Amino acid sequence: MSTQLTSRGPYPKGIKRRQQIVEAAARVFAQYGYNNGSLRQIASEVGVSAPTLVSYFGQKEALLIAVWDYWSEQSAVLSAGYSGLAYFEWLPRLMEYHTAHRGFIELFLTLATEASDPGHPARDFMVNRYEKAVEEMSGHLREALAKGEVLPLSDSEIESEVRGVIALLDGDEIQWLLNPEIDLVRLVSTHLNVVLARWTGQPERSSPPAAR
C-alpha cells in the first residue's frame, strides 16, 4: 500500500518536501528505532512543524510505509532488466547501493528485530515484506530453472534456497554495520559465489577485488 499525497497536490515543492520528510524519517528511525523515533524529531530534521508533517502523512505508520515505498522504488529501478540467475549475480551491485544508503539498511534491520514482538506496530508490515522478498526471489530462481541455468530444484528447495540467500544478505549487512571496514560487496560476492556454484554445478567464480 502506498501513501497518497495530501490536498497540497503533486506540486514540485510539495513533492520535494515529501521526499525530504521520508529521508529524514529513515534517518530518525534508523538511529532511534521505530518505537522511539518521534514525529517531532523527524519534523525537526526537516525544519517543519509536527502539524505540517502530519498534514503530509497523517499517522506514524503511514510514514513508515512511505519510507519503504521510496526504498522499494529505488531498488526496483536498480534491478530492472535482471531476471533468472542474472538477478542473483546482480545482488552484489545492490550492496554497492546499500553502502551508500546506510540509514535505510539500519532502519530495515532494526525494524526486523523489533518486529519480532507480536505487538509491534510494524509486525505485519515486516512479515509481509519478507514474504514478498521470498516470492520475488523464488520467481527468479524458478525462471533460472526453466531456462536450464540451474540444477533441478523442488518447490520446497527453492523456498529454502532463497530464504538462505536473504539470511546471507542480512547477516553480511549486520556485520558491515558493526564494522564498516568490512568490504560488504566483496563479502556478499564471495558467499553468493558458493551458492551459485551449488545451484549450477559449476566451479566457484572469483570475487571482485577488495575495495580500496
Image (cartoon, rainbow, N blue to C red):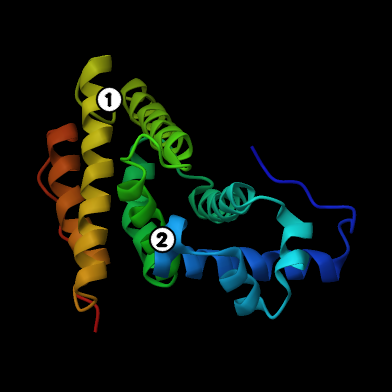
| Percent of width and height locating residue 50 | 70, 68
Q: Amino acid at mark 2?
A: Gly
| Percent of width and height locating residue 180 | 24, 76
Q: Which mark is residue 159?
A: 1
CA distance separating discs 1 and 2: 30 Å
Q: Amino acid at mark 1?
A: Glu
* Relative horizontal placement of residue 17, taking residue 160 as reference (left or right): right
Whether 18 is drawn above or below 112: the answer is below
Whether 113 is drawn above or below 201: the answer is below
* Relative horizontal placement of residue 109, taking residue 28 as reference (left or right): left
Secondary structure of the residue carrying tag 2 is helix
Secondary structure of the residue carrying tag 1 is helix
| Percent of width and height locating residue 94 | 39, 58
Residue topped by disc 2: 33
Give the quarter of the figure containing the C terminus: bottom left
Residue at 20% across, 21% down: 157
In-front residue for pair 18/35: 35
Instruction: Kindly indicate the quadrant of the structure image that contains residue 20.
Output: bottom right
